[in-house]
Image (cartoon, rainbow, N blue to C red):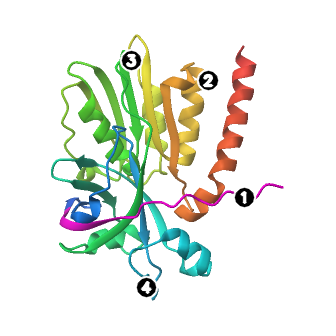
Amino acid sequence: MAEPRPRAKRTVHCGRVEKAERITPHMVRVVLGGEGLAAFGTSGPTDSYVKLLFAPPGVDYPEPLDVEAIRAERPREEWPIQRTYTVRAWDPTARLLTIDFVVHGDSGVAGPWAADARPGDLLRFVGPGGAYAPGTDADWHLLAGDEAALPAIAASIELLPAGRTAHAFIEVADAAEEQPLPTEADLRVHWLHRGSRPVGAALVEAVKALEFPAGRVQAFVHGEANAVKELRSYLRVERAIAREDLSISGYWRLGRNEDAWQSSKAEWNRRVEEEEAARLGSTV
């Protein structure tokens, strides 16, 4: 039996907080800079993401941080806590990285850190990953998601060419969570206020009610897993959109933290694909 291949060592970047500001009641924008970003860069995807690394309470790590060594030498409860966040913006000239954090009081790990972030604070992370950017050969674009997907949607909107038709459906808590979305595209923004409704209900309803423009659509649909699952089925089966024209994934799942969601996501996706294949087969 072949020996298992060792996990490749990942570069750990270290950003210094240059600025932190609350741009809506529940979203904090943190701008990172410093020499610790010298090896960081993105190749163009507007859904680029990084995995932030937080030490569990009471745990200290030697410098430089070596994630693989910690995993090999320390008990699991001392491993870094990872949280995935979208790159809102990257300025390669100034070497400034912007990340938007959804903050809900003291819940979670990354949100409370961002709420308390001050200039000079350090944040370590690995990445980036990412694969989606608006294609130039689509006739129009559909972008849909909740607060977690808003940074990627906003980055995508900025990249759309002048005059390109686009519909953006963004579900947020209320009107106070809306923010400017500058673009040269022919953009219709549909802000959806959740209020007391379940997460994703307004989003699914609004996307299904859209009268689709003519031509080939490229769709980006990310956010809460259950809502994404319903929209994926609608777009693939009822709208017959080709898989290659879809970027669609559950960023998070209601009732689960990121650790629990990531550990079950592959099985969730497998079941979703099986259900989708069965439905597609029945429509042939």
Q: Which mark is residue 138?
A: 3
In the displayed structure, 175 sits above or below 164; it is below
Q: Position of residue 10 (x, y in %)?
A: 47, 60
Q: Which mark is residue 60?
A: 4
In this orientation, which residue lies closer to the viewer: 6 or 20?
6
Q: Is residue 111 left or right of residue 66?
A: left
Spatial CA span between label 1 and label 4: 29 Å
Q: Position of residue 121 (x, y in %)?
A: 25, 74
Kind of residue indicated by mark 2? Val
Residue that sits furthest to the front in the current view: 2
Kind of residue indicated by mark 3? Ala
Q: Quadrant of the N terminus?
A: bottom right
Disc 2: which residue: 237
Say what secondary structure mark 1 lies in: loop
Disc 1: which residue: 4
- Tell which tag, 3 or 4, sits nearer the viewer: 4
Spatial CA span between label 1 and label 2: 40 Å
Which residue is at 36% across, 36% downward?
A: 169
Of marks 3 and 2, which one's residue comes earlier in the chain?
A: 3
- Tell which tag, 1 or 3, sits nearer the viewer: 1
Kind of residue indicated by mark 4? Asp
